[in-house]
Image (tube, rainbow, N blue to C red):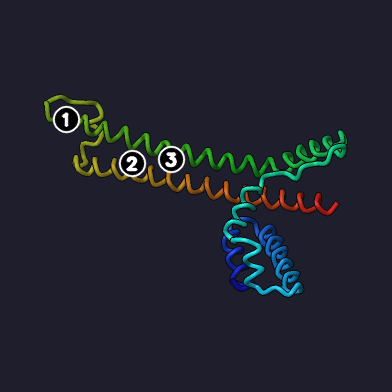
Amino acid sequence: MSQKEYLDLLRYYLRKLPDNVVEDIIADYEEHFRLGKEAGKSEGVISAELGSPIEIARDFKASEYQFTPREPGKTSSGSQVGKVLLLVLGLLVLSPVILTILSLVFAVFATVLSLIVAAVVSFFAIGSSLFLKGLGFATPWAQLNVSLHPLTQIFTSLACLCLGLLSLVIFLYFLKFIYSICKRIFVAIHWEIKKRRARR
């Protein structure tokens, strides 16, 4: 496998990681190829020695949350206090954004839930009113929609139910999208922290 093919495959398998992480990994493997060529090796030999791009990508993804182990004696109470202060300040700065996102999520969830509940309740109400009307009984809610044809009432309820379920699916995809963005930001920051620690 040529260097370009190898790096293109590696970049493809790492595509879900943040850009700064991918670029650092690619730069590292470009350096491996450069050193291998200087040693007189062919691109195919270097590729075989480095291993499969998909396995390398899996290893990086599996270790993306693992912190670099600290050497004994390097931990200090000052650094711990600094981290706590930084965390508190970060929460204070980001609290308006976090509250806005949480409010939006709650509002969408409440809307979706109310649509589904309203559709289910109206569907059963219409069904029971038609059944009781056929038996000769009158129900209070049967008089509310007397101007609508029974089939229209049923299809309206089904449409509301489908709309509620569709909204629920969209809401779940929205949550997944927010989660993926937060994960990418976390991985990018964590990667930069690990890089700085490694340079010390």
Q: Looking at the picture, how far across and down is residue 49, in whole percent?
A: 65, 64
- Judging depth in this view, the residue of 24 and 159 nearest the camera is 24
User: Marks 2 and 1: CB-CB under 8 Å?
Assistant: no
User: Which of pointers 3 and 2 lies earlier in the amino acid sequence?
Assistant: 3
Which residue position is annotated with label 2?
161
Q: Looking at the picture, how far across and down is residue 137, in whole percent?
A: 15, 24
Quarter holding residue 13: bottom right
SS type, badge 3? helix
Q: Amino acid at mark 3?
A: Val
Picture layout, residue 133 above or below residue 167: above
User: Marks 3 and 2: CB-CB under 8 Å?
Assistant: no
- Residue at the image position 70 percent from the left and 73 percent from the top: 41
Disc 1 packing (10 Å; few <14; some 14–19; many ≥20):
few
Which numbered dot is residue 112?
Answer: 3
- Residue at the image position 36 percent from the left and 46 percent from the top: 163
SS type, badge 2? helix
Alpha-carbon span between mark 2 and mark 1: 21 Å
SS type, badge 1? helix
Q: Looking at the picture, how far across and down is residue 38, in whole percent?
A: 76, 74
Quarter holding residue 12: bottom right
Q: Amino acid at mark 2?
A: Leu
Which numbered dot is residue 131?
Answer: 1
Q: Amino acid at mark 1?
A: Phe
User: Which of pointers 3 and 1 lies earlier in the amino acid sequence?
Assistant: 3
User: Marks 3 and 1: CB-CB under 8 Å?
Assistant: no
- Judging depth in this view, the residue of 167 and 175 nearest the camera is 175
Alpha-carbon span between mark 3 and mark 2: 10 Å
Q: Looking at the picture, how far across and down is residue 122, in whole percent?
A: 30, 34
Picture layout, residue 164 above or below residue 22: above
Which numbered dot is residue 20?
Answer: none
Alpha-carbon span between mark 3 and mark 1: 29 Å
- Residue at the image position 69 percent from the left and 63 percent from the top: 23
